[in-house]
Amino acid sequence: MAVSRQIRAEVDEILPGIIADRRWLHENPELGFEETKTAEFVRQRLESLGVEDIRTGIAKTGVTGLIRGTAEGSGKTVLLRADMDGLPIDEENDVDYKSQTEGVMHACGHDGHTAMLLGVARLLMERRDQFSGNVKLLFQPSEEAYGGGAKPMIEAGVLEDPHVDAVFGQHLLSHMPVGTIWITGGPVQASADMFKIRIQGKGGHGAMPHGTVDPIQIAMQIGTALQTIVSRNVDPMEQVVVSVCNIHAGKADNVIPDTAELGGTVRTFTPENRDLAERRMKEIATGIAASMGGSAEVRYTRGYPPTVNDDAMADLVWDAAVKVVGEENVHKMTPMMPAEDFSYFLEERPGTYFMTGCGNEEKGIVWPHHHPRFDIDEDAFQFGVATMVQTVLDYLGSTETGTTNG
Amino acid sequence: MITQTLQHDIDEILPGVIADRRHLHENPELGFQEFKTAEFVRQRLESLGVEDIRTGVAVTGVTGLIRGTGPGEARTILVRADMDALPIHEENDVEYRSRTDGVMHACGHDAHTAIQLAVARLLMERRSEFAGTVKLCFQPAEETPPGGAIRMIEEGVLDDPAVDAAVGLHMSSSDPTGTVRVGGGPVMAGGDLFRITVKGKGGHAASPHLVVDPIAIGAQIVTALQTLVSRETDPMATVVVTVGMFNGGDAFNVIPDTVTFGGTVRAFDMDLLDRTNRRIGELASGIASSMGGSAEVEIMRGYPPTVNDDAMAELVRSAAVAEIGEENVLPADPKMGGEDFSHFLRHRPGAYFNVGHRNEARGITYGHHHPRFEIDEEALGTGMRVMTSSVLHYLKEGL
């Protein structure tokens, strides 16, 4: 507890700097894989802090750096990740630090994530004698854009040299009040897959349906039958969404078209349900199309996998957060349907992704993420930074806490 | 300390408890017909010295009071066991096999009743340790909605003296002997039944243009019902809509006048149950009228969701941890089945917990309601221990 109070005091001291960094980043948002100014800003900060082994240009604009602990101990390596990209949204906030780039805005809080991780780096540099092993700082491009920056960074080897043992990340959350932290073991965010179903019928005159194989009818039947994946195939205690979001067929009012196309998204929290949904979709589409004399081709594209926290690591972060904000402000997080590419890190290594409340009704900070009026209560930074620092110290702080038992 | 004497006393009376359970198992009775069972319970309570014994509550229910003589705040806790058996023909080859053809204790209510008689005995011996009152409630007809619980409540079982909290237990064939399972929030689903009658206009199968085909309407309704789950319910919430029967027509070449189909709705949240029932009605009548027919929807309310009070669940959990060790106390694992202890929980804070009785080595692995369902009787001791300790904790310390 004493350690934590000290961390909080030090965070208070550097908070104005973290806020200034965040505002600079907010004024200068960049889209995914285009974060060149942001990456250069991060590089300079890390260099001036004395962070070692700074590498840039990973997956285009990603940056990593290393803080080596000087204490005796397990010598493990923990990776901390922040995402850096803005969104193609035109900011509607009337603030000093409003985006200076029209049509681009930090509307998801990644400016806060990046500034907080720089604050974490500063505090950990000052505490190198209190932990053994390494802290790998990772600034990731393009969490928002399809494909994402996490996967190419992993492919570029960020989980090795030195070998990473555990991964942690956090996300600011505007619908949760500032001063609260939200954590749970197991699945926390869903996978996000896309599908296109292309139905091949046989077109013809609208007045003579008997000579055709009507792809619109096939599409309707498939769209209806897809509902049964959720209502009949998935365990009712588990959560899956299958949404048909677009449907296109034909151009004329009196012509039965040759083809029809359905598209949409599938969200799941487990690899098993993900496989189930993909398999059932293919069976339903091809089976129904064949039964009606046509054919269907399903293009199922996997997006971000489900974000699944390690139970022991979640407990570790939970305990760290309790030290920072008190038990009454640490809450069990309810899994969310939006996806997150930190999931790729969690597929490779045990770790935890937690949520830091940044909403404040009194200050009017109530707008949801991705909204042109999204904003952050900057008081949240102290809690996010202190929780992350405490987590690292608890994980790397001694041989005892260097285990996943926390 | 308490723990050691409790275990000692349980070891001593366990053979008698097993004998009670076997007597009940040999003499199973269906819901609201538990006359012999109730008389057995009454006699046992009387010989224990339980006060204010009332019989014939909700036909066959029995209640009794244990009044504490110790110091402290006087609270009243209701402890409930269900007594009814099922219309199943037992296939177990045991000495104490059901003597009534076609009726069997295949859900463990024999064990619930025997455990509660033992809990009564243990608490009678400890009256000096607590103030307040234990109300023992032996309930008829848990298996057949609307069930015995709501009727006992209507007849005033929660008053005179006023009940402050309620606890109940259920044997669980999916957890091993020696464990209990408890947690706050929803633990069992609520379930209602629906029956939809579609009226069309029958006629010759070769002249469909002259009829309103109720089978085609019914098929559309069943298909559309799927979207109540897949499109209308928050994906983070849990609801099941299942059509379990569909009947219409008798001939190959006649389009019938009507079809009838029905099924069940399950959810952990009363509002969600209500909303889903309402939407079934709207979908059915809307689709039917769009196709020139009509639909009548009948909802038969079953049991509401069983929702444990967080504080009461924590009380039972910590009593269980003290008695049988943390490693034997499992977290809640909500199930889709229904249970009418839920009615007590809608009126009073309480907790419903599971007592594991699975024993693979002894071949005790059959699920509830199976003709070969059996109980590892070692588990009776676990149930007695955790229930007795929970009641004592509540009466001594409150919530």
Image (cartoon, coloured by chain):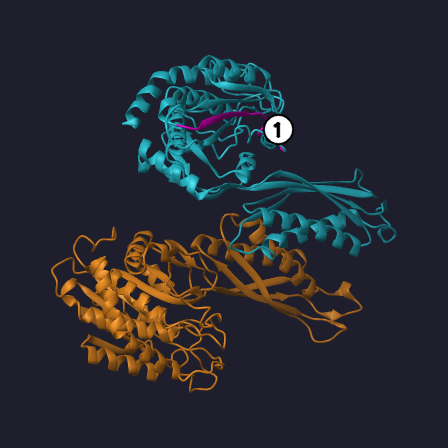
Disc 1 residue type (three-letter)? Glu
Q: Colour of chain B?
A: cyan
- Which quadrant: the N terminus of chain B? top left
What subunit carries mark 1?
B
- Which quadrant: the C terminus of chain B? top left
Residue B153 vs A354, above or below: the answer is above
Q: Colour of chain A?
A: orange
Count the marks: 1
Residue B357 colored in magenta in the image: no
Q: Residue at x 49, y 77 (%)?
A: A372
Q: Secondary structure at mark 1?
A: loop
Residue B145 vs A240, above or below: the answer is above
Q: Residue at x 24, y 77 (%)?
A: A55
Q: Residue at x 51, y 13 (%)?
A: B43
A403 vs A32, left or right, is left
The residue pinned by badge 1 equals B155
Quarter occupied by residue A165? bottom left
User: Residue B374 placed where, x, y %?
Assistant: 46, 24
Is residue A225 among what the camera can see? yes
Is residue B337 among what the camera can see? no
Quarter occupied by residue A343? bottom left
Residue B163 vs A380, above or below: the answer is above
Residue A295 vs B336, above or below: the answer is below
Q: Residue at x 73, y 48 (%)?
A: B218
User: Residue B133 placed where, x, y %?
Assistant: 45, 27
User: Residue A1 placed where, x, y %?
Assistant: 23, 57
The span picked out in magenta is: B131-145
Decide: few, some or many residues near mark 1? Use Cα within 10 Å; few <14, some 14-19, many ≥20: few
Quarter occupied by residue A127? bottom left
Residue B141 colored in magenta in the image: yes
A389 vs B370, left or right, is left
User: Residue B349 placed where, x, y %?
Assistant: 49, 39
